Amino acid sequence: MHEFRTPISSIKLNLELLERTAHQQGAVDAATVVRLLEVSKRQLNRLSRMVDRLLDVAQVESDRLVLHRERLDLCELVEDAAERLGAEAARAGCELRLELDRPVDGCWDRLRLEQVTTNLIANALKHGGPCLVTIRVRRDGDGQAELIVSDEGGGIAEDDHYRIFEPFERAASSSQQDGAGLGLYIVREIVTAHGGRVLVSSRRGAGAAFSVHVPTHAEGC
């Protein structure tokens, strides 16, 4: 997959440049070392995220996506995710706005719902461009927990709605973006495993809103 070649090539290039500089100069100044290693570190982190997503896909497709449910407040989980992504939002020129109708308690797998929340927010930051990203948590009309992540970016053509949740698929407008096209697929499968559903509301040029609806109760929890 070419998505893996890009970070691998970048890491290799930076290490070769560091080695060549050391051979030519005999000593490399600290600033150069730090700069080249920081680039390599970012690419390694990117590669690690891709591998993690492929492992998640393997679990999903082999029916080994096991949930470890516990009682938790979805509002607190979303607050923590937004805080972790604050620096990434700043780099993207985005503002994160939280609208939390707390508490929204339920019986869910904490790590998996953190993954859902993180993927949706990161997706908005990546494809929404510099804009306001709003994250809402509340109970929907059916009493289920509802998480909505919306942005004011370029939006998604309606013809792409049906396929963006499939593995290795991305909206046509996102073809030049980083990633393997697995984030939304993993979101859908985690939400489905919780007995819920995920929907998208968007059109080209009018932003996008992803809404997750999950039951708050589960047997034995």
Image (cartoon, rainbow, N blue to C red):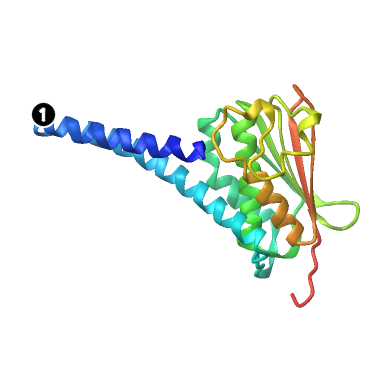
Q: Residue furthest top?
A: 205
Quadrant where the image shows the C terminus = bottom right
Residue 166 position in % (x across, y down): 71, 44
Residue 48 position in % (x across, y down): 46, 49
Residue occupied by mark 1:
25
Look at label 1 and name its amino acid: Gln
**Can I make out residue 185 in this image?**
yes
Residue 164 position in % (x across, y down): 71, 39
Q: In the visual, does 219 lie left or right of 84?
A: right
Number of labelled discs?
1
Name which quarter of the figure residue 68 lies in.
bottom right
Say if 107 sits above or below 36 in the image: below
Residue 180 position in % (x across, y down): 57, 40
Say if 35 sits above or below 102 in the image: above
Q: Kindly state the secondary structure of the residue where label 1 is placed.
A: helix
Name which quarter of the figure residue 126 lies in.
top right
Q: In the visual, does 54 lie left or right of 10?
A: right
**Can I make out residue 28 in this image?**
no
Say if 57 sits above or below 63 in the image: above
Q: In the visual, does 196 lie left or right of 130?
A: right
